[in-house]
Image (cartoon, grey):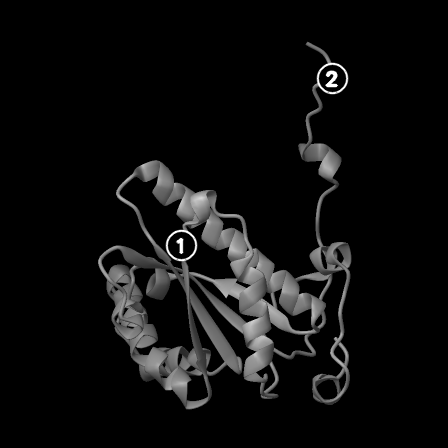
Amino acid sequence: MANATSQAQEVRPTLDTLTAIRTRRAIKQYLDTPIPKEWVEELLDAAHWAPNHNLTHPWRFHVFSGDGRERLVAAREQAVRFAAQRRGEEVTDEMLGLARQKCYSSPVIIIVAMVGDDNPIVDRENYAACWVAIENLLLAATARGLGSYPSTGDWIDQNFVGPVLGLTEKERPVSCVFLGYSEQPTMGKRLPVARHTFWYTEA
């Protein structure tokens, strides 16, 4: 990516949709450059336009930045303890330090949660809709010159973040999205789509 600091001071970039799709990559190294709140709001609005059956709007966006990221540390540490216990290992100060560091690894962290449904079909549709919303967010971030990375893991899968977010019994976390400027080099890796495509042109 171009120098993030200079980008933040200049006119914001805009990529066309196909270019954003082809150049989006998981970014795990971020600069400390802050992102204006209205820019994050723009990405969330893009996410909000994702298709969702019967307009259930099942997504909930929880945005953490600045000192607000401290709220996530306990949940991340809890997940580390859970994983260590599952492996039969002792939790070390280094493990807990890395957990804290992860919560501050990008200037903005967005946890996407969903509203579930007792109907298993609707519930699956809502979960899928949330991931489409996440992809919208990732592509919009790429188009605007920002790096991003969707993540799950124990703190999401085991709902350790639930109490932090104040989730109800019907809500559950879907993914954590790290967001920020980055100078991490990226390279596209995809097999030719023809390997995974089947055409049907006759009865």
> Which of the numbered marks, if any, corresponds to residue 144?
none
Q: Position of residue 136 (x, y in %)?
A: 59, 58
- Left or right: residue 23 compared with residue 155: right
Q: Quadrant of the N terminus?
A: bottom right
**Label disc, if present, on residue 58 of the rendered structure:** 1
Residue 143 screen position, x and y as percent: 71, 67
Secondary element at image label 1: loop
Q: Identify which amino acid the numbered label 1 is placed on.
A: Pro
Direction front: furthest residue: 54
- Determine the image quadrant of residue 76: bottom left
Q: Report which residue position mark 2 lands on.
A: 201
Label 2: element kind: loop
Q: Quadrant of the C terminus?
A: top right
Viewer-side residue, 97 vs 57: 57
Decide: few, some or many residues near mark 2? Use Cα within 10 Å; few <14, some 14-19, many ≥20. few
Q: Residue at x 29, y 60 (%)?
A: 158
Q: Which numbered disc flags the more N-terminal residue, 2 or 1?
A: 1
Whole-angstrom CA distance, mark 2 to mark 1, is 37 Å
Q: Nearer the viewer, residue 91 or 39?
A: 39
